[in-house]
Amino acid sequence: MTRVTLRDVALHAGVSHQTVSNVLNDHPSIRPQTRERVLRAIEALDYHPNSAAKALRESRVTTICCGFYDHSPETIADPYRNLVQSAFLAEATAQGYDMTTAFLNSDVPRGFSTLRTSFLQQRFAGVVLVGTSVTPECLDLLGQWNMPTVLFDHAEPSALFPVVTADYRSGMEHLVTRLAFRGHQRLALVIPPGDQGGSAAARREGFHAAALRHGLQTTTEPGDWSSASGETAFTRIWRRTPRPDAVLCANDRMAAGALYAARMIGVGVPADVRITGFDDFEFARYTAPSLTTLHVPLAEMARAAVRLLLTEIETARAGQPTREPVFLKMPVTLVERESAAC
Amino acid sequence: MTRVTLRDVALHAGVSHQTVSNVLNDHPSIRPQTRERVLRAIEALDYHPNSAAKALRESRVTTICCGFYDHSPETIADPYRNLVQSAFLAEATAQGYDMTTAFLNSDVPRGFSTLRTSFLQQRFAGVVLVGTSVTPECLDLLGQWNMPTVLFDHAEPSALFPVVTADYRSGMEHLVTRLAFRGHQRLALVIPPGDQGGSAAARREGFHAAALRHGLQTTTEPGDWSSASGETAFTRIWRRTPRPDAVLCANDRMAAGALYAARMIGVGVPADVRITGFDDFEFARYTAPSLTTLHVPLAEMARAAVRLLLTEIETARAGQPTREPVFLKMPVTLVERESAAC
DNA sequence: TTGAAAGCGCTAACAA
DNA sequence: TTGTTAGCGCTTTCAA
């Protein structure tokens, strides 16, 4: 159980431990012959450098954190997270970094201070904060910690951190415009309330802006991103007078719930009402009717976010805190399926 | 940007750095007054111990790894992973551990050796290996590394590692028996081929055992867990003669694909054919018709797996490699919905 | 009850 | 080109 160290390798190769270190770090000025001998010793002893020692000595960790903000039981099963996370990890790995994951609950001060503690303990070098609802107050707080951070899915540019998001607003506008051209008059939107500066807010704004432009009537019903909340929302909406002719849901999961509720009540989709989602996850194609929705290029966004974070980390290490504000907004595209067909 | 260390705290409190360490580690024999003073200094300086230094000194890491085996593009969107992972993390956090995630691709030797390298570099203390298809050869390999490991979702007991799984076999048997009692004669199974000792194998065995017992005809069609493969599989199956009167899918995602294909072809479910899934994810309730499936208690399993892993880690540290083989098999329950209603 | 010394495994700086 | 020295921040002896 005793580990092989640099010294063991040095002993085996008949050189000093420093020479071994030099070989490992590709220092110049090592005779090929020595180098060869060291490499053989490393192989023979199955040596692997201790990452803690390296991190300690270099005052540098090669781990990034994927922080899911606003973690609640309702969103645990959300396929969104998995996609994002696995894209993060792939990119991080490609760049020679490890990744840890943190789920921050909405208990803001406590969740954030846990993250900060972890950072100050040097457990990770920087974080991609995933999730809506990062309020301006939180951002100010974060800003004071100077922890390399990238905001994922934050709708507004930030002076403090790079932001990677998608054009949720235009996506929604596009969808509403399309529905307007098809003669729809009364739209209902199912969306989580609040979320200032977050992606829900962007979706809501796009909805209202386009509806106003086209002179459409609108109502809003709260949801919490879960399918169950979509179900409830649709039921409530359908009791109203006048009834909407299209129900737009802020994500696919809620839309799936709405479709289910419609079927239970005996409302035909798309005959009696159109229903749309947002995100375009795997099962959007597999609802009945299949779901018209907006596609978000999550994997691409995730790759960009990690790359930006690594730049942030390098910049912070080099001690150059000034930088242009970065705001990456990826296009969102309409995917037309049955639930809102003509 | 310069970090606060033990020495800084000691200086501030007017004691030696060792005393600070003693306070942090709750050593006895510290005068309450001194203790108080040190704690105030820690507070005042916002001190956080460096985890790398601690790990190095104690030769001990407090990170576990969540290793998803058989990672392929098809399974990235799988909600299964997220549920499992977030349950792992919650339990690990509760026990004072961090968690990293690794996605091992099916390129067995390379993927595994990356994991091993990471372990030998002391990046994590042990791994929960999630996924089917861990072949006996892989297990032997793993066994030689003596890396604390727990197998998640492995169907057979192992002499080498604790296993946490669900009773996939009985679940399938129960479902087949139910269908037999309802007069079904010809069953088709959509399932990934191979997977010796994995959960797919258990599902397949349960299926065949029960079908045999009840004298039912069976056919099998390959799938790769993805919805798209379920779609293809159903289409193929429906071209056969005679047609089955029930199509059992080895997971919900494939079942969703099968439902879609049936609808496209114009086959009524459950009127013309019954379709069932396995796992009971959120959207199983939201397909149309809603999906009859088998519920797997993933969160509970995940908690148990982490606890077992921590025990393994402790045991290994204490140098007592012998231990009773552990095999935890959680119950799987039938959830009846519309797609296989009477 | 507290402090001083040693060293975990590594790398940066310098000396040979 | 290689070896020696020092120290990253912490905890574990052991002595005061």
Image (cartoon, coloured by chain):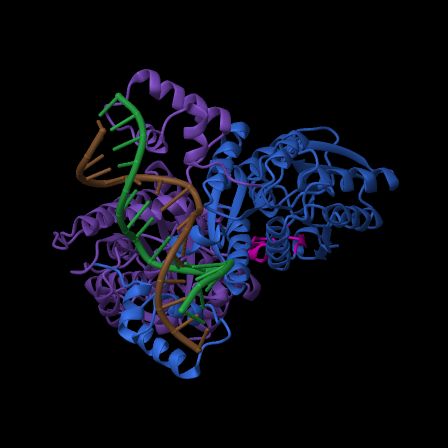
Chain colours: A blue, B purple, C green, D brown
Residue A287 highlighted magenta (yes or no): yes
Q: Is residue B164 left or right of residue B69?
A: left
- Decide: is B70 above or below B78: below
- Compare residues B263 and A299 and report the one nearer the observer: A299
Q: Residue at x 28, y 62 (%)?
A: B207
Q: Position of residue B197 (x, y in %)?
A: 25, 65
- Decide: is B70 above or below B295: below
- Compare residues B322 and A182 and report the one nearer the observer: B322
Q: Is residue A290 visible?
A: no
Name the quadrant containing residue A95.
bottom right
- Compare residues B168 and A234 and report the one nearer the observer: B168
Query: Which quadrant would the N terminus of chain A be assigned to in this image?
Result: bottom left
Q: Position of residue A165 (x, y in %)?
A: 68, 49
Q: Position of residue A191 (x, y in %)?
A: 65, 36
Q: Is residue B133 visible?
A: yes
Query: Which quadrant would the C terminus of chain A be assigned to in this image?
Result: bottom right
- Compare residues C11 and B256 and report the one nearer the observer: C11
Q: Is residue A185 left or right of residue B300?
A: right
Q: Residue at x 67, y 39 (%)?
A: A198
Chain part drawn in magenta:
A279-296
The number of numbered badges drawn on the structure is: 0
Q: Position of residue B163 (x, y in %)?
A: 23, 54
Overall secondary structure of the magenta stretch?
loop
Q: Is residue A265 left or right of residue B65?
A: right
Q: Hey, which residue is sitting farthest top in the picture?
A: B33
Residue A12 highlighted magenta (yes or no): no
